[in-house]
């Protein structure tokens, strides 16, 4: 098989879809030495030295995998998005990949394709489930480009069964057209206990000026992450427990419509108790999780929700929402809450902090749960989807 893949998000996005794409394609490179892969990056003038660190903690180097070829395009991802999805110019992706049997877009949308079979990954339909969480321009773009990609694609990958059901219900995708492939947890996310790990954690604590005891949440600061309610719930917790010597640390860059979160952190009683440390370098994440005493993920909607699993792998108890894909991901290994219930969130945090038996149980169950999700398994499932989609075309022929 000759397979084309848009690797742009992997090269340019530090977290989220970029990291997911780096990991699954990196695991695929370890698994498959037979088929030929054409990866392209809309570099827009960026040098490779500016690209993000890649899969499995290493920079993804195609020179180590001769069946993977990387091609750069002297156009930015924004320029291509305008050409493909707004102007709908017939700028066929094969101009960048060469002739391929299958083209895979791992980031919601599909470019014009001349002859290849097509596969698109849709990570979530949050723009339809919680549209109020999006700025108008982004919402209009997604409402047009994503349904169009799902209609055009020969097959669709969803990150979870919850997203698969959303695709069927909200976009009318036939059930047989959608495959579910769960994300994995990288081996670097584990409990850090030796001397070298202690030095690493001390360096990360210093780098981000972290308190001794803290509740951690990781994610882009935007309404869907429900961080304003998290801050409010934390305020209630410390009001009820004035001697509690824990702070709240929120790690993530500013996304959009984030003003309410910062306003909530300025209410009386919370001064100095809520710390925004911005985007955390990918290499620092394992130590950050290990330093936390509790991880909280109160999202209103998630297509998968990898941070709770990463925290579990690091031996941190987790509190998270019981909506969308999250129950599917965390199982019984986390305390789950209604993300709209601020009182319930505060109580769950109190229990996870104060109940030693509960904490021990969550840590043990969490490690076992996280171990079930691997990138190797995801790559095996992705390779099978590639094969099935191409075979289906041959059978039609």
Image: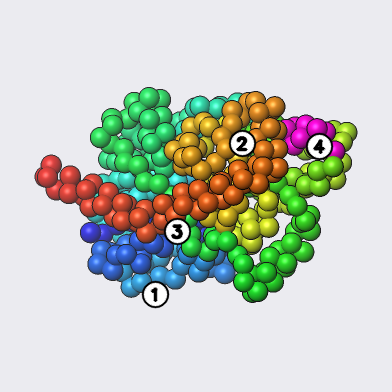
Distance (Cα) linking label 4 and label 3:
41 Å
**Of the numbered discs in the image, which one, if any, rests on residue 298?**
2
CA–CA distance in space, label 1 to label 4: 55 Å
Residue for point 77% across, 47% down: 246
Magenta-colored stretch includes residue 236 = yes
CA–CA distance between discs 3 and 1?
Answer: 16 Å
Q: Are marks 4 and 3 in contact (CB under 8 Å)?
A: no
Left or right: 357, with 120 as reference point: right
Identify the image quadrant of the C terminus. Answer: top left
The local crowd at label 3, few if under 14, some if 14 to 19, many if 20 or more residues have their Cα within 10 Å, is: many
Instruction: Provide the secondary structure element on which disc 1 rests.
Output: helix
**What kind of colouring is applied to the model shown?**
rainbow
C-alpha gap between disc 4 and disc 2? 21 Å
Q: Marks 2 and 1: which is nearer the front? A: 2
Q: Earlier in the sequence, mark 1 or mark 4?
A: 1
* Alpha carbons under labels 3 and 2: distance apart: 25 Å
Element under disc 4 = loop
Q: Earlier in the sequence, mark 4 or mark 2?
A: 4
Magenta span of residues: 232-242
Local crowd at mark 4 within 10 Å, few (<14), some, or many (≥20)?
Answer: few
Tell me, for residue 64, which label it has, or none: 1
Judged by depth in the image, the label closer to the viewer, 3 or 1, is 3
First in sequence: mark 4 vs mark 3: 3
Check disc 4 and report the residue beneath it: 241
Answer whether residue 134 is magenta in the image: no
Which residue is at the front of the view, 172 or 397?
172
Kindly identify which residue carries mark 3: 23
33 relative to 338, above or below = below
């Amino acid at each position: 098989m000759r397979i084309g893949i848009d690797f742009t998000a992997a090269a340019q996005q530090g977290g989220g879809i970029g990291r997911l794409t780096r990991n699954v394609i990196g695991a695929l490179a370890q698994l498959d030495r037979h088929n030929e892969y054409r990866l392209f990056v809309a570099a827009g003038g960026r040098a490779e030295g500016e690209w993000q660190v890649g899969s499995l903690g290493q920079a993804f180097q195609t020179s180590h995998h001769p069946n993977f070829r990387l091609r750069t395009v002297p156009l930015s991802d924004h320029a291509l998005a305008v050409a493909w999805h707004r102007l709908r110019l017939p700028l066929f992706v094969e101009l960048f990949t060469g002739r391929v049997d299958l083209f895979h877009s791992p980031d919601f949308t599909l470019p014009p394709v001349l002859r290849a079979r097509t596969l698109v990954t849709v990570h979530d339909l949050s723009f339809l489930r919680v549209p109020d969480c999006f700025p108008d321009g982004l919402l209009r773009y997604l409402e047009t480009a994503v349904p169009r990609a799902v209609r055009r694609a020969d097959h669709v990958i969803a990150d979870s069964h919850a997203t698969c059901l959303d695709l069927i219900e909200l976009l009318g995708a036939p059930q047989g057209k959608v495959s579910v492939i769960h994300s994995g947890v990288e081996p670097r996310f584990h409990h850090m206990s030796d001397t070298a790990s202690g030095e690493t954690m001390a360096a990360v604590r210093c780098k981000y000026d972290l308190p001794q005891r803290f509740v951690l949440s990781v994610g882009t600061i935007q309404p869907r992450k429900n961080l304003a309610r998290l801050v409010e719930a934390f305020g209630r917790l410390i009001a009820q427990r004035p001697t509690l010597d824990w702070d709240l640390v929120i790690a993530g860059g500013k996304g959009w419509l984030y003003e309410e979160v910062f306003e909530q952190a300025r209410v009386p009683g919370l001064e100095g108790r809520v710390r925004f440390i911005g985007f955390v370098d990918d290499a620092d994440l394992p130590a950050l999780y290990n330093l936390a005493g509790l991880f909280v993920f109160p999202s209103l909607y998630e297509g998968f929700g990898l941070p709770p699993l990463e925290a579990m792998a690091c031996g941190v108890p987790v509190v998270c929402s019981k909506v969308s894909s999250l129950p599917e991901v965390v199982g019984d290994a986390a305390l789950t809450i209604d993300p709209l219930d601020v009182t319930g969130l505060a109580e769950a945090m109190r229990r996870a902090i104060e109940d030693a038996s509960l904490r021990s149980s969550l840590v043990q169950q969490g490690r076992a749960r996280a171990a079930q999700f691997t990138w190797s398994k995801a790559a095996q499932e992705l390779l099978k989807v590639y094969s099935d989609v191409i075979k289906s075309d041959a059978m039609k022929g």
